[in-house]
Amino acid sequence: MGRAEQELDILEKISQILGDGMELSQVFQRAMALLSERLDIQRASLVLWDESSDQARIIAATGLTREEMQRGRYALGEGITGRVLATGQPQVIPDVSRDPDFLNRTGSRSLKSVDPASPPISFICVPIKDGNRDVGVISVDKPFLDDSTLAADARLLAIIAGSFAQTIRIHQLLQLEKDKLLAENQQLRDNLHSKYKFDNIIGSSPAMLDVLAVIAQVASSRATVLLLGETGVGKELIAKAIHYNSPRRDKALIRVNCGALSAQLLESELFGHVKGAFTGAVRDKIGRFEAADSGTIFLDEIGTLDPQLQVKLLRVLQEREFERVGDHRTVKVDVRVIAATNLDLEEEVRRGTFREDLYYRLNVVTINIPPLRSRREDIARLIDHFLDRYNRENSRNLRKISRDVLNTLLRYPWPGNVRELENAVERAVVLSQGEDFTDDLLPLQIRLFAQQVRTDSPDESIEDLAGKLAAHSIRQFRAQEGQIYDLAVGELERQLIRQALEQTGNVKTRAADFLGINRNTLNKKVKDLGIPAD
């Protein structure tokens, strides 16, 4: 093959290499490996200008060790490499041992030949131009043959450097875009962490303070968490708070609603499948557990899980491994599980619809999230929070809430909990035309409740009844001066709890909700006041 044909062949193959879209260092190394094979090149370096350090440095090389590459740094105008970068003019050195400007900065060359008969080392350094700007250089060294061959090699390398300029520019643009996306991703993660800080969870009632204390303790661990509570109490919010305050905060939080899919689809969704596992499985698919590896998976409505899937989930919790649908290979994962349900899982276990061993695996740390009617102290703050949010989103200014409307919202039982309250406030903001929050902005069921309460209200107010009770207690317990308060309050609590238990068929959870207190508080009162449990 003649020289011209050889050069055309080299340029064609290098064009193919540059079009492969690999990392810049890999592209350069493949191109230089080709030149080394065809032109007897011993070493080659790609040097780019680094504006952050205000110097040029080797970013890719062949024939150099990592330590030698690290030493390859040049100021503008320093040595042959720095001069080419400063002037934009190529430099060809037939014998580096005779050129005083050759620095041998990498220390990779022996400038004094051991064998006097061996040919000298030539050095070719050509600029890489991006428009009118010199962004780097390509340098090679090889044994000297003759002046014409050295000049031909320099011309060929200059053409290759021109091809590299476009590749370098594309890679730099891609890197800038990648850095931008990484920065935006980190900003989003920081925002999520800030949004779900414990301080941002609205709740100053004793029941919610207990919940916040538990999640603050459990967040830093990898323990499985079971969230119990009615629909709309904020179980997903608590799950997010646990994840974004844990060591896994920078990893994925994957959410799965176990009640939204059929058993077969849910199995594929959770564990993935291989091509051909079932009709419609046209390609391999990873499941949510694999996607959540090193992070957290939130399994909502866990109580609806199919019995066969319960077995597979139990294995994941115990062994941290599973198989995709239709596959025999075991996949290992490191996933923290947070599960949630509005069902009484103990009752489901007794009925045989939920595995007892799975229940105990999930029940490592159980958090009971109280319904809104058990934490009425938080309602006013929640209203303010939702007003701020939806006023901002809808460009409204609904601010002034009347005492009657606030009393209605405080007394309403909120069967849909915080979610229902949020929807009610959003509706009011959207329909509002001014600053006044009036009762006509409330949903129909809340207005009907307020009307019924007004109709059913006794002639005697709670204040009148309380006054009569206090006067009667003082007369009744006059002989036990110093104990009147404890006796009167104790007897009132005893009668209230007994009546509530009677009204609810001795179901303590319902009795606690009826009275608007926490179930643990009710249990303690029953024990302290000596109220029969049956």
Image: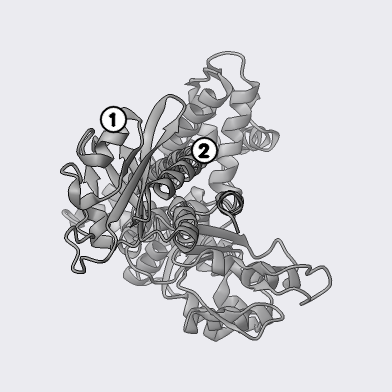
Residue positioned 54% across, 28% down in the render:
390
Is residue 439 in sight in this rendering?
no
* Residue 174, percent from left and from top: 50, 42
Q: In this rendering, is residue 451 above or below 368?
A: above
Q: CA distance from mark 1 to mark 2?
A: 20 Å
* Residue 243, percent from left and from top: 42, 57
- Amino acid type at circle 2 is Gln
State the residue in front, 388 or 271.
271
Query: Of callouts 1 and 2, which one flags the residue occurring earlier in the amino acid sequence?
Result: 1
- Amino acid type at circle 1 is Ala
Q: Quadrant of residue 446?
A: top right
* Residue 96, percent from left and from top: 23, 50
Asked if marks 1 and 2 touch (Cβ < 8 Å), the reply is no
Q: In this rendering, is residue 346 above or below 227?
A: below
Residue denoted by label 1: 86
Residue positioned 31% across, 35% down in the render:
84
State the residue in front, 263 or 2.
2
* Residue 167, percent from left and from top: 51, 42
Is residue 142 in sight in this rendering?
yes
Q: Residue furthest right?
A: 279
